[in-house]
Image (spheres, rainbow, N blue to C red):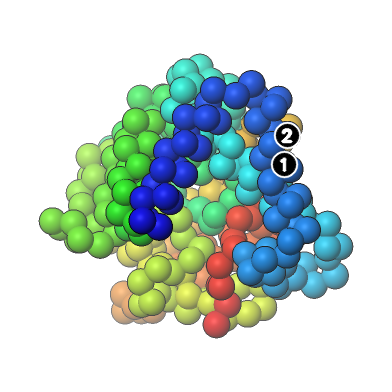
Amino acid sequence: MKDRLIEWGYAAGWRVTRALPLPLARRLFQFGADRAYARNGPGTQRLRRNLRQVKPDMDDLLVRDGLRSYARYWLEAFRLPSQTRQHFLDGFGMSDENYSELKSAITDGKGVVLALPHVGNWDAAAAWLVSHDWRMVTVAERLKPEGVYEQFLAYRRKLGMEVLPLTGGRRAPLEVLAERLGQGYAVCLLGDRDLSRNGVEVTFFGGRTRMPAGPAILAIRTGAPLYAVDLYFTETQTRAVLRRITPATEGPLDVRVKATTQMLADAFAIGIAEHPQDWHMLQKLWL
């Protein structure tokens, strides 16, 4: 029964939020964020600890702003399926230089590996990318209950993404992703939190954590260009900054993967330090 209630809750979120006038929806989601801040539950406490690792001298209002940013992500996610292609294009942006670099990387036939932390609105970034008629594939964690996973699968596929399951698929995700890179796809992967417990240990904001090895392995094995993607909110858009990562070339594969993943961690840290309120990490991260 609990699983069914969770499934109904997400389904209602998609339907009701799209039906509300945007100003009212914004007020409601901000109210929910402020209430979560005042209640100071486990997720809020975890966010505070994570942000303090990023900015030890932070004002606690950064936690409130982080929750408001996270609420904005959910508001936009619930409304995305009802938006037009032009909305996707207008609601996302990057510099002309980054755009030209990304376009060249995708259209030269090798594809591109885009690794990003849980920042801003990554679904808006994906919708913008496929609105340029660029093919994109990602990997999704199998959420529980299964009905919620299926809802997110349908949601992201409706936006134009190809979505592979992290576990339980017919083929290993890395095998399929390497194949897609050869077909000129953009491979987009969240890279700041290891879900396999077999990730690469890195140093991140002065602490030890593990990050997934997939982005580094794909770039090293296929030669596809690798970028760390920084996303952040402005008043009207999600903005992106791309940071090119040149994979390590010395030593055996595991050494090169570790060194390249550390480069990604360092690039993620630059963006997160610049706008920590838009890093939505409410789970345990550091070892």
Q: Quadrant of the C terminus?
A: bottom right
Residue 237 picture location, percent across and down: 64, 31
Q: Is residue 7 visible?
A: yes
Q: CA distance from mark 2 to mark 1?
A: 5 Å
Residue assigned mark 1: 30
Q: Is residue 34 above or below residue 72?
A: below
Q: Residue at x 50, y 17 (%)?
A: 86
Q: Locate residue 153, reporting x and y percent.
A: 32, 43
Q: Amino acid at mark 2?
A: Arg
Could you say which is closer to the camera, residue 257 or residue 37?
37
Secondary structure found at label 2: helix
Q: At 54% from the left edge and 23% from the top edge, which residue is drawn?
A: 19
Residue type indicated by callout 1: Gln
- Residue 31, image x, y percentages: 73, 43
Q: Are marks 2 and 1 in contact (CB under 8 Å)?
A: yes
Q: Position of residue 193 (x, y in %)?
A: 48, 66
Q: Given the current orientation, which residue lies at the most extreme front position?
A: 1
The structure residue drawn at horizontal position 75% and vertical position 70%, both measured from the top left corner, is 52
Q: Quadrant of residue 283?
A: bottom right
Q: Is residue 22 left or right of residue 89?
A: right
* Mark 1 secondary-structure assignment: helix
Q: Is residue 222 left or right of residue 76?
A: left
Write down the residue under mark 2.
27
Image side of residue 7 versus residue 79, left or right: left
Q: Is residue 137 visible?
A: no
For the N terminus, the image quarter is bottom left
Q: Answer few, some or many: residues within 10 Å of disc 1's Cα (few below 14, many 20 plus, some between 14 and 19).
A: many
* Relative height, residue 60 to residue 70 (above, below): below
